Each structure stands twice: as C-alpha cells, then as structure tokens.
Amino acid sequence: MADTVLTDAVGFLFCLILFSIISKRIKLPYVGLIIIPAGIALYSIGPNPFLFGIFLATGWHLLSVGVGIIFPVEEL
C-alpha cells in the first residue's frame, strides 16, 4: 500500500514538473494537442497520477496564457 502511494506521488510530481517545462517551450496550439488526449484518457481510464499530472500542468499553462491574453499587463 505505501509503495503504491509513493509511486503514484512520485509519478504525479514527475509528470507535473516535466510537462510544466514542456508546455512553456512549445506553441500554444500544440499544448492543446497534449491536454485533449490526456483529458480523454482520464475520462476513459479513470484516476491516474501520470495523466493527472500532464493534464494539470498543461491546463495551468493554458490558463496562465489565456489570462495574460485577456488581461494584458502593461509594463511600468
């Protein structure tokens, strides 16, 4: 039981960090190509720490970029 929880936590953090870095380096439409299959897989497979890390990291990047586009901040 403890091994499974530790493995899931490490897998989640690994995917979260990896895809946070990846999503910042690729263009915005390609981030959509990552999040959509991850969301479909989460829906069809069910809870999975690896897929959730991918979905969370790319979704967070999309949210950040979207808010930056909608509410641009002017430099002082």
Image (cartoon, rainbow, N blue to C red):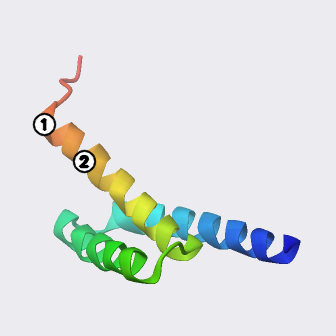
Q: Is residue 67 above or below residue 17?
A: above
Are there few (<14), some (14-19), or many (20+) residues within 10 Å of tag 1? few
Query: Of the numbered discs in the image, which one, if any, rests on residue 70?
Result: 1
Circles 2 and 1, Cβ within 8 Å, touching? The answer is no
Farthest residue toward the top? Answer: 76
Q: Is residue 58 above or below residue 48?
A: above
**Closer to us: 41 or 19:** 41
Q: Is residue 50 above or below residue 74?
A: below
Residue type of the residue flagged with mark 1: Ile
* For residue 22, side relative to residue 13 (left or right): left
The image quadrant where one finds the N terminus is bottom right
| Disc with the residue nearer the chain's start (2 vs 1) | 2
Query: Of the numbered discs in the image, which one, if any, rests on residue 65?
Result: 2
Q: Quadrant of residue 10?
A: bottom right
Which residue is depicted at the point 49% across and 67% down? 52
Provide residue 76's location: percent of width, then percent of height: 23, 16
* For residue 26, side relative to residue 66 (left or right): right
Residue type of the residue flagged with mark 2: Val
Cα distance in 3D space between marks 2 and 1 = 9 Å
Q: How many marks?
A: 2
* For residue 23, side relative to residue 2 (left or right): left
Which residue is depicted at the point 22% across and 67% down? 27
Secondary structure found at label 1: helix
**Closer to us: 48 or 59:** 48
Secondary structure found at label 2: helix
Which residue is depicted at the point 13% across and 36% down? 70
Which residue is depicted at the point 29% across and 47% down? 63
